[in-house]
Amino acid sequence: MPRRTHDHTTFEAIAAAAGVSLSSVDRVLNERGSVSEKTRQKVLAAAREMGINRNLPEAWHRVQHVDIILPRNQAMHWQVLDQTFQALGVNVPRWLSLHRQRLPQNDFKALRDALLAPPHQRAGLIIAADAAEDIAPALREVMARGEKLVTLTTEVPGLPAHGFSGINNITSGRTAGYLMRRLGSLTDPGAKVLIMQGNARRLEHFQRVEGFRAGLGDIARQIFMHVDETEAGAAERALRRVLADGERISGLYCTGTYSEELGPLMAAMGGARPIWITHDKTPAHEALMQRGLLDFVLDQDSAAQAAWALALMITMLSGEPWTGAPQLAPELRLFCCENLSN
């Protein structure tokens, strides 16, 4: 039991407000004994209502488990997310236990199993969900169990209120379309804009294409192709086929990252190179912009997405802001050869 000092008076006030015994307050706040989840929540709610939780930021939290689920994909975005979560993990409160998972891309069963049958009692889930329509029912079930949810990179429509960390992918695509339209080199009536969609399941790729077409308008005819960004050489072969068919390409928009294989082909085209716009500021994309081969990159601020998602989750679980990382929401960032860091 607490000493008969200010602590004793405080604990008595919490007990009275929560409608529980003084010993229950002691067990919850000092984590020394079992207590029902209902009683625990009553005590914590009363303490927060009294405004004293800031004085004891971690003393009354049991260990809470949070899963972070990302696709097993070699694209730079996913690597940065995973590395940032790993780095930030050393700064999270002592009551929080993070479990990072990289699941095979496009493996719906593995993803559903990870969502619905975690190996521990899970308090929260941070997930970059693919196939949003397919996985939404499982996410609703997770939320119905009382788990906190933060979706990452791609918002999943049709869910109850939850956290989200990412940019607006439709706006990102619209920006690319606007740039393509305003650059003024799409005046050849026989030329077309080639759209390469890099993933057939992830919602953000569909949203980028949707936004791009809206931003581009009807000033140019379009060729649409799905080219899996994980298949080596697929983008280069696709572009070569289009050119071999005699098509004149004035613009190239890629939702995925094909830079290493498309770069040499774009360089070989010389003055006939189309305007090229893609996503994610990678070292390869920076090098292509510096060489004058890639015109614009729209970046989704990967590191900020991870930090913001973790901050949202900690606040949702504790009711208090987290100061372990910069609190800046991810923003759409635009890069070209003129604004790269030296």
Image (cartoon, helix red, strand yellow):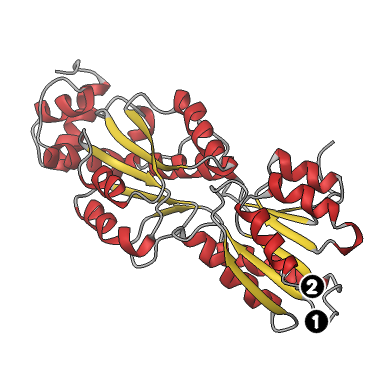
Q: Is residue 77 shown left or right of residue 279?
A: left
Say few, some or many: other residues with alpha carbon within 10 Å of mark 1 (under 14 / 14 to 19 / 20 or more).
few
On residue 190, the disc is 1
Above or below residue 135? Residue 314 is above
Contact, mark 2 vs mark 1 (Cβ under 8 Å): yes
Above or below residue 198? Residue 97 is above
Q: Can residue 321 be seen by looking at this rendering?
A: yes
Above or below residue 53? Residue 330 is below
Question: Which residue is farthest front?
Answer: 244
Q: Residue at x 26, y 38 (%)?
A: 47
At numbered mark 2, what does the secondary structure look like: helix, strand or loop? loop
Q: Can residue 332 be seen by looking at this rendering?
A: no
Q: Is residue 89 shown left or right of residue 271?
A: left
Q: Residue at x 34, y 30 (%)?
A: 96
Q: Residue 315 versus residue 66: which sits nearer the camera?
A: 66
Q: Residue at x 53, y 66 (%)?
A: 207
> Which residue in the structure is indicated by mark 2?
248
At label 1, the amino acid type is Gly
Q: Is residue 35 shown left or right of residue 323?
A: left
Residue 284 in the image: state x and y as whole percent: 72, 41
Image quarter of residue 327: top right
Residue 285 in the image: state x and y as whole percent: 73, 45
Query: Which numbered disc flags the more N-terminal residue, 2 or 1?
Result: 1
On residue 62, the disc is none
